[in-house]
Amino acid sequence: MKYTLLFFFSMLLHTSFGQAAEGTLLGTWTAPELPASNAHDNIYNEVWGLAVNDHEFAVIGTTLGTHIIDVTDPNNPIELFVVEGGTTGGAIIHRDFHDHKGYLYSIADEGSNTALQIIDITQLPDAIEVVYDDSEFFTRSHNIFIDASKDRLYSLISNGDAFGYSPMRIFDISDPLDPKVLGAYSDLDGYSISQVHDAFVRNDTAYLNLGPGGFAIVDFVDVVNPNVISVITAAEYPQSGYNHSGWLSDDGDFYYMADETFGSDMKVLDLRNLPDIDIPTLFNSESDTTDIPHNQIVKGDKLYVSYYFDGLQVYDISDPINPIREMYYPTSKFPYTTGLYRGAWGVYPLLPSGNILVSDMQEGLFVIDGKLSTSTEEIQKELDNQEFVISPNPNNGIFELDLTSFTGQVISVEITDNTGKLILRKPMFTNVHSIDLSQNLTNGIYNISVDNGEKKVTKRLMISK
């Protein structure tokens, strides 16, 4: 079936998210003795996470190979094993990982001796075993993604000894140690593609980031005759650049997409009316015009992004069209420099503990506490306290502050951001006050403190314009 291109914009909301809280660093791991890549001065690249036998592990790639780090005690990460890659040293920039049915799949994008390595991880933390190391199908792959529900591995920008370059290949890995080629794709139902840089796949539906070629959603139930659901060319969406990566919301209604282009915002794609795709929102890390996103993962109502120079960025997407930046952690020491790639490469927030793994290209592995001090759950608990009421909350900066239940004649009210910066301080009486701070507050979470001299009560104010 030919694809039908039906694409439109609603009124585009360009948001700037402020007042996020800095995350708490639990532990780090580095291997400074290893050489950096010749191209980007990075020792480290992708990160993945594993939960095996009641332990948690970080998997991080380096110019040497695949490192397995025990992070069960997040304050004391310990390297247990390293699997040396077929090619090592300065030629290596990028490795990628996914696990499936007790096996870790490891691949690199560079090197004449690169091959697919499959590692048995079922005996962790005591032992691992490399059970497959072969270049028949893989002499390079920029990224891999496994659709576990269908036992399929998607190899993106790949070569193999048995065949040449392909923008994308699909493998059957129902037998994890015997990959079988199902198809190779440079044409999607009449839409020609030069590469698939990254993919998110769920139940045979693939969300494909096509590098310079835009974005496509494709049904691969029939791998011989895939059905293109929708395509957006690079010319058809705002701030397009190199379409790098994305991740689907849990309900499948929204896709959060990154163009790996300096100064390009991330995009919210509304998929509720497919084949029409709406892009209602652009958002960023609110730091510098040269910021550049890289990889992202959605977990529930949170979006986790490795943001190069800007380190880790975490957004509340409980309102999926209006991401609110609520936590960050600065992994990189480098100043913004357009054209250079430095800082946070990968992120993995899916460990049972909730701890967040981040790989920084120059600084190594970071383990960050996943508990958000500004979580919506905490805010709801505060709202249940009726000593004073903020209505509505969230709001756009215009709200009512009801102090009728707060005792005392004259009450001091303070509003501060999460850095402690004072926004407002004034005395108020015990009645209802209309407040308009819409010109003063950007999107984010603020603190309102009410003090009568005997007690002080603080609640959170969420701004979402």
Image (spheres, rainbow, N blue to C red):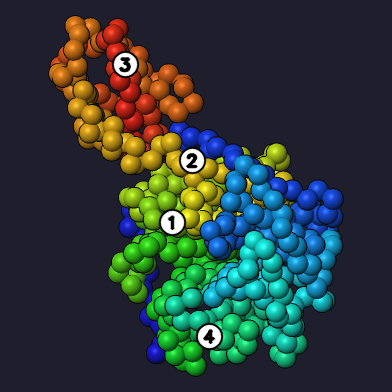
Residue at left offset 38%, top offset 40%: 375
The amino acid pointed to by label 4 is Ser
Q: Is residue 253 above or below residue 86?
A: above
Mark in front: 1 vs 4: 4
**Is tag 3's residue or tag 4's residue first in the polypeptide sequence?**
4
Side (left or right) of 305 relative to 228: right
Residue at left offset 49%, top offset 76%: 147
Residue with the mark numbered 2: 327
Q: Are marks 1 and 2 in contact (CB under 8 Å)?
A: no
Q: Is residue 221 above or below residue 251?
A: below
SS assignment at label 2: strand
How far, Cα to Cα, is label 2 from label 3?
26 Å
Q: Quadrant of the N terminus?
A: bottom left
Residue 363: % across, % down: 72, 46
The amino acid pointed to by label 2 is Met
Residue at left offset 46%, top offset 81%: 150
Residue 192: % across, % down: 55, 82
Q: Are marks 2 and 3 in contact (CB under 8 Å)?
A: no
